Image: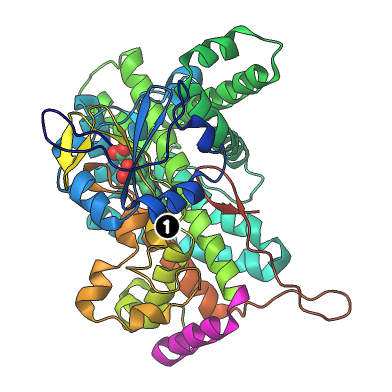
Amino acid sequence: ASTHPRLGARPPPGPTPIPVLGNLHQVPAEGQHIVFTDWGKKYGPVVYAQCLSVKMVILNTLQAADDLLDKRGAIYSDRPHFGLITDVLDWKPNLPFLPYNDQWRKHRRLCQNAVGTTQSLAGFRPLHRVESLKLLMELMQTPEDFMLHIKRYPAALMLEIAYGHSVTSIDDELVVLTDEAVCEITSLGGLASTLIDFFPAVRRVLTWLPSFSVSRRVEKVRGLVQAMMNIPYEKVKQEMASGSARPSFLKTMLEEHTQAQDDMTPEQERELMCLSSIMYSAGADTTGAAMLTFMLAMTLHPEVFRKAQAEIDRVIGSSRLPDWDDRASLPYLECVLKEVYRWNPPGSLAVPHRAMTEDTYNTLHIPHGSMMIANLWGMTRDTNMYRDPDTFFPERFEQMDKVEAELKDPRKIIFGFGRRVCPGRLLGDASVWLAMASIISVFDIAKARDKDGIEISPEVAFVPGSIRRET
Ligand code: HEM
């Protein structure tokens, strides 16, 4: 590799590019994190690749991600332009994909205040309690539908928080609508976001050619996204007009405008509409993915389940359900939760950041405009951090002293980095913890049996796409 003339630094190592495409042919549409993890083993913590004109810097260790995205947050908090989501699907202004500017600061602050403080979390306690009880009831009535129940719980939490919409069943119209929209976006995510964002010409072709099946698919998803933003927004406005609106993020925001006697512009309406839809879409699937991983891990590892159950029985007994105040007294459960996050992080890659200037890191030259991809999956497989990383083994955290456990807490990885770190991390973590603790205290989890009474071992397989859900 050549030396960078001005900084005397070399580009990070990476796979050999070919003319025009660069490394595009080596980046698969699905399972990019696996290829990036292999590159990490071969080339090191910071890997450089180029897809057409897009410069990519892949960060494979927590240290590299912290050093750059967190400690140098002033120059690494921008986002690359996400043409698919913002332009093609017209889902904007979209907090996770906004550039690092004043509009992002405003949306981030609103979101952080609504869901990201310990105070807001305390306000959600009654909601968490009601929804976790509903989850237990549903699991009791139809345990075979556990995947649906586990999907309903975070969806209900987020729809209540964003819109004051109470979800009683998985067939609820808003759950069905938002779930379909999010699933479609996620499944477009792997293939289309890379292709469309790398080939601006493809984007034009996709929207021009109505007979092209991908184009029809994109049209359908755009319609769903617009409905996902509009329908709940209009519903809350109507409920406010009739006096039946329940407390919610959107209601509070709309009331602030009314109190200030400030007629909202269409742009302001659009901002609120979009931000409320982001809360649901960013919060529901990620939380649900962690809960499904928990169920899978407990099915495969009955010894872990029994140990966590014994801890709950010993500390809490059987006369009441676990509550927030019990969390510090259940250290093994905390290890199980951390291992759930580590074994299968809900997102394999964080949302890419963008280098706003050129930079040098450990003699490596990071070019201006690089797409900074934090390979969360690779970090959870880093053998310098976690021995035998493919094995589900909560005890690994028990064996660490306090300092090491703090340094290697997977929450430092799975929620992303720096100024863009997930603003919903406290809420997501609290939702998963309460569901886990409640399920363990009430139920046994075991493998299903076939008609001959033989145990069926579930296959460990995950839906490809940006959020890792079990198939
Ligand atoms: C277990 C649950 C969750 C996981 C694993 C998770 C993970 C992530 C990750 C990896 C990012 C990207 C961070 C980066 O760019 O470095 C992110 C961003 C974000 N998350 Fe979460 N998240 C979860 C729950 C939630 C919840 C409940 C909300 C509710 C509002 C939420 C809202 C957001 C938003 C708005 C962003 C974009 C932040 C920005 O660009 O400034 N997330 N999340």
* Residue toward you, 452 or 407: 407
Asked whether mark 1 lies closer than 8 Å to ligand 1, one says no
| Residue ranking furthest to the front | 2
Q: Is residue 348 magenta?
A: no
x and y percent of residue 124 in the render? 35, 56
Q: Is residue 330 visible?
A: no
- Residue 181 image point, x, y percent: 57, 33
Residue type indicated by callout 1: Leu
Using residue 211 as the reference point, say whether residue 132 is left or right of it.
left
Relative depth, front residue between 295 and 11:
11
Q: Secondary structure at mark 1?
A: helix
At horizontal 31% and vertical 20% (from top left) the residue drawn is 268
Q: Position of residue 43 (x, y in %)?
A: 36, 50
Q: How is the image coloured?
A: rainbow
Quadrant of the image for the N terminus? top left
Q: Which residues are magenta?
A: 299-317
Residue pointed to by mark 1: 127
**Is residue 185 shown left or right of residue 217?**
left
398 relative to 262 in the view: left or right: right
Instruction: Work out whether 36 lies above or below 385.
Output: above
Residue 178 figure quarter: top right
Mark 1 surroundings within 10 Å by alpha-carbon count, few (fewer than 14), some (14 through 19), many (20 or more): some
- Say which residue appears at 39% left-offset and 49% top-offset: 375
Q: In the displayed structure, does residue 374 sit left or right of residue 4? A: right
Q: Viewer-proximal residue, 257 or 284? A: 284
Q: Position of residue 15 (x, y in %)?
A: 42, 40
View extreme (right): residue: 452
The answer to whether one can see residue 191 in this image is yes
Which residue appears at 38% of the width and 68% of the height?
383
Q: Is residue 312 magenta?
A: yes
- Residue depicted at x 51% and y 37%: 26
- Majority secondary structure of the magenta segment? helix
